[in-house]
Image (cartoon, coloured by chain):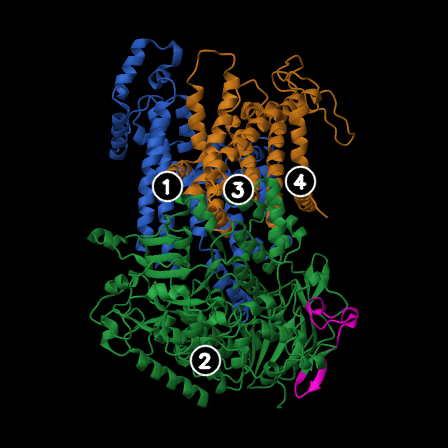
Chain colours: A blue, B green, C orange
Amino acid sequence: MLKFLRRRFVFFFFTYLISSLMIFFLLRVLPGDPARVIAGGREATAEQVAQIRSELGLNAPLPQQYVNWLGNFLGGDWGKTIAFRGADNRELIVQRSINSARLALVALLLSVPLSLVLGIIAGLRENKLPDVIISLLTLSVVSLPEFVTGLFLINIVALGWGRSKLAGALGWWFPSSSAVRANASFSEMLPALWLPAFAATLVLLAYISRLTRAGVIEELKRDYVRAAALKGIPYRSVITRHVLRNALLPTVTVIAISITWLISGLVVIEYVFGFPGLGSLLIAAIERRDLLLVQSIVMVSVTVILFTNLFADMAYAALNPRIKLG
Amino acid sequence: MTAPLLDVERLTISYRIGKRWIPAVRDFHLQLAPGHIVGLVGESGSGKSTVALALMRYLSSNGRVESGGRLAFAGEDLLSKSDAEMRSIWARRVKLAPQNAGAALNPSMKIGAQVTEVLGAALGIGGAEAEQAMLRMFHDVNLVDPEKVAERYPHELSGGMQQRVVIAMALITNPELLILDEPTTGLDVTTEAVILDLIRGLMAKRDTGVIYITHNLGVVAQLCERVLVLYAGEIMEEAPVEQLYAAPRHPYSLGLLNSVPRLGQSKADSRLHSISGNPPALAELTRGCVFAERCDFVIDKCRAEKPPLEQLGDGRAVRCFRWEEVTVYPHPKSNAPSVPRPTGDDSEASRRRGPAHRDRLPPIAMGGLRGVEKNTSPLQRGVRDEERVLQKDDRDTDTLMRVTDLKKHFPVARSLGDWLRGKKPAPIRAVDGVNLTLGAGQTLGLVGESGSGKTTLSRLIIGLQERTGGQLELLGMDIRNSVRERSPDVLSKLQMVFQNPQNSLNPYLSVRQALRRPLVKLRGMTPAGAEAEVAQLLRRVNLREDYADRFPAELSGGEKQRVAVARAFASDPDLIICDEPVSALDVSVQSAVLNLLARLQEEHGTAYLFISHDLAVVGYLSDVIAVMYLGQLFEVGAASDLFQPPYHPYTEALVSAIPVADPHHKAERMLLHDVLPSAQRLPSGCRFHTRCPRKIGAVCEEEAPPWREVDAGHAIRCHIPLEELSALQHSFLRREEIA
Amino acid sequence: MNPSLFSRQIAALRHFAAVLLRRPQSALGTALVCFFLFLALFGAGLAPYPNPNDQSHAVRVSPTLDIGALRLGEHPFGTDRLGRDVYSRVILGARSIFRIAGLGALISVIVGSALGLYMGYRGGWFDELLGRVIDALLAIPALVLALVLVGIIRNLDFEIGSWQAELADNVVLLVIAVLYVPVVARVARSSALDIKTREFVEAAEIRGEPTTYIIFREILPSVIPALVVEASLRFSYAIFLVASLGFLGFGARPPSPDWGLMVNENRGGFYQLTPWALDFPALAIAILVIAVNLMSDGIRRAVQKGN
């Protein structure tokens, strides 16, 4: 187990280092002058460009720039924004991250239990009617792009069916606008969270339930399941004590991987719903060419993803007896 | 006979394939009384596991028992039972110990919990009471440290221990019927002997009726009272075990018994009997006898109508029209395969060689062990000195390959603790100083349990793995480490036949493509020349020329292995390494491949390094045998000498573990308990001392044993002086004979 | 009885198609994908108004499509607020999404498999290093990486204005290829690792075959089923990604008839005015995504059955 964890730690640091290198150099090495981009492209004067260069420390050699940048990032100094009237990058990102995390949390709380149940049902009834329905559902409706489902939800609740009774009833639960103040508290924000969270739930549902289904089907084929049934214990115990116990072990990892998936989804969902999270900030930052902000946002999301994976590995190792000796 | 515990008649079991129901097992019958053991023997595809599941009434959803049959257990009709009723029968009264014990245990549940769960379902007891019952049962199956075992997970147990747990789990409710489905398949012969011994002991004390399913005729002979021989889903013969082995009445039983090489049988004496052809596929069954296509006794009637299972009285039954004649010709001479053999006749070839061949001393032994002091034991000298002595020898002219002090140490990744303490972990010493010499045209057999390093040794020689140290010489040339560095000349001289026919041919290349490539690549042939040679090669391995256009999926296991042999011979090599080439094949196909290897060796003068866990098979094909244990050789000798005392205690254990296909051979076995120690933490002194039944004392733990030469070419590495060893072992054998 | 290798392959392909089309869901998905592919290839001839930016029509015309009467009418999907025919724009939009997603997926599969097979077979430091880079790349969410790359690259060159939309399209294509190369490489690598321990590969090594022969003749054929599945999966993800990028304004530039872009341009306040200008491209995206998913799921099942 120690060896396994050590490998995961080494993996974590390596991956972190390489991702940061890539994020840094992708934004610096590409043809073109970032300072000129920031200053406004071709219209910018040479003085403006020069000033931005020195402000950003772009005159130093690249490796040194990288070290400075990574040091600053790890030390918590993420610089000032250009796009948002000189606000502090870190404050902005932390605030938006909290909002995104709230959204993600609600989405996970909704989707994980639901998709596990659906996946288990589909797996136990492989190729029977429930499985066909669930598979068709996860393959079709649920795997639509987030903006399609998001807009559909908005249109049902707020716009198209505004005067129908259904929408009225739904509207009571789901306020038409998700546009909330960026610094609202969780309870203030909650009403506005449901709709985007529901859209995000759909994103995860397909992914987690299909992997759960595959896991259940795989375990059902194993010899020990037959051996357990031939012990004469009831079917229900065979499933709960034997099949699910092994089938759900990898789910920890699946959920961690789905975080990566979720972050991509959140970018679109936040944009569609005008939700003040990290994703909508990223789009704004890219549109306004705020390089430093973009770098920091990407670094934050990579950090989140790598940490979730690390925790998932640790949890998996703790739960799976087969890894202990490893 | 007491009232039958199990009474099965006219049982037909079908599987759905596509939209058709195809009968996989037809007209099966079986009577079993309490306290008796009946063996169910069959090759893969014979339907024996299907029978096991059907008897449990646990067929998968695409299988069913056809109506019209009878399946009665203790007078109750199982076929009409509901699921709930079956569950209560499964819980207590009928148990199945499945094939592959490791897979039958839940990997994420502690052993104890899995066993007590059975008690909960069967007897409704749990807690401390169940715990006590479990520990008693674990004690009965000879599990060392039952409390600790209960706290472990399945992957932390060895294969033998897993099998004991599964047997304990089956017997803990004291069932009336126990079905053992190949319980020792996949275990080492030493572990197999221990498990069989255990089963015999456990059953002697109980009233349980046992059905023992296996493909191994030796195991049946040692364990069962009655035997059913199953072929392609039908019973061919039923007989009390002594009678079956003494006088089989069905051509298939006869063929099976004759195709297994007996220990001590050699290629120089005779070819093995072999059953030509392959078992029929389920979909292509005909009206006639299922065995007709492969039968030496076949007449027109056999193809036209199915023979009934004829009761012969005395508990015997046989499904053959000509059973009376089978006794007349116990060894039919008409055993030539139906495929015409273009190159030489086997029997004639072996006659030509004659018995004189056996007197010829194998050059390997002479060269390899020259310089060992006879019978004097230089105990003070360490292993290293001994090895240096072993290397001092003359260069024999007909020495083909010389292996000197060959080593392979796999480095082990450092653990976190070691890393912090700056310690480097010991490497895994898979091969640790092996010296061998192999003469041209000879077979060197290499035996040992799995984990002994024999496969690694072969991979070092072929160059698929890089050696850590030592030299390799082929025809006097120093051979490089890995295949990548070797010249085409060396590559063409050294070829290999792999274990698993399933994987040894590329499924996407036709036989022609597979054979043409080495011809072009290693023999520099033109495409046209290669084309003719492909046909030639196929004929030489007894395959029709039109096989060239087949793909591996269209070949049976035995045919694939023939193609693999042809591929190895394509470059006209001097040495072919055969790593368990027949162990994945069915008995009836095995002997044909062994005969083929023996014949090709004669024709081409090719040397083999033959690795197998099956001592009889190795003995049959080898001129010289080396016994390997934990990366080192412990005995080397001519095949004819090796299986008689004096032998190394390890060899002795291996030999006595073989289940002999003769019910009268009631051997007192020398059992090896414990498992093979880790090759990372090797035992001090003699590596075998932790398991050696003949350990003499501290000297075994402290000092590496010396090589002692029995006679020219036969040497044993042991602390016990040869005379003593010989005396001990002869008296052991005599006791066996008396018992 | 000497069927050539070629006829065997045809038979295998026919069998594969039969298995794929036997399931109604897979057959439906495949048929729909073929329908969209047809639109992508011949859309210019099918659209009533071949110029997608023809603004000569009345603005905000309601759809004239009448399914009950099987009548298309003059503007089946209506016109948008600028007076462009939505029906023609939806038909013409099929081409760009197929070109970008299809080509992007194809490039990533070819490059990724070559890379992955080599990594898996050779192992060693090359595999180690590249493996780390791939892990790092995969730690960045695909859409985020795509947004950053497209956003940056698009802003780099201001020299020539006219081909910027063209460039932007190619940037997305390139980004998709870059994004999915590591994913495909990983799949190919693990397949190669599995196959390379098979004994027929060792037999080739014993013959002294060169690395390229072993990779392409011995290993590749066994990996192709897995790669086919991966290719269909990549294609479905690529469609998804192209639509999302278009919607976020990082795909095609206005006024091109990109479905995602059309959805974005007609949302919010405009939706109340011309809901059809959003609904129909959104529907097109939805149907295509579902169809591709059903097809790739069918391909996966068919390949698994074949094994």
Q: Nearer the viewer, residue C276 or A291?
A: A291
The answer to if B17 sits in the magenta stretch is no
Nearer the camera: disc 4 or disc 3: 3
Tag 1: residue type?
A: Glu
Q: Of discs 4 and 2, which sits in the foreground?
A: 4
Give the image location of residue B725, x and y in percent: 33, 80
Do the residues indicated by labels 4 and 3 lie within the same chain of the protein? no
Give the spatial CA distance, label 4 vs label 3. 27 Å
The N terminus of chain B lies in which quarter of the figure?
bottom right
Q: Which residue is mark 2?
A: B197
Q: Amino acid at mark 4?
A: Phe
Between C122 and A55, the one lying in front of the other is C122
Q: Chain of mark 3?
A: B
Contact flag, marks 3 and 1 (Cβ < 8 Å): no
What range is drawn magenta here? B289-316
Residue pointed to by mark 3 = B524
Mark 1 vs 4, N-terminal side: 4
Where residue A184 sits, quadrant-wise, is top left
**x, y percent for residue B123:** 49, 79
From the image, which quarter does the C terminus of chain B lie in?
bottom left
Name the residue carrying label 4: C6
Q: Amino acid type of disc 3?
A: Gly
Q: Give the mark toward the camera: 1 or 4.
A: 4
Residue A147 visible within the image: no
- The image quadrant of residue B256 is bottom right
Are tags 2 and 3 found on a single chain? yes
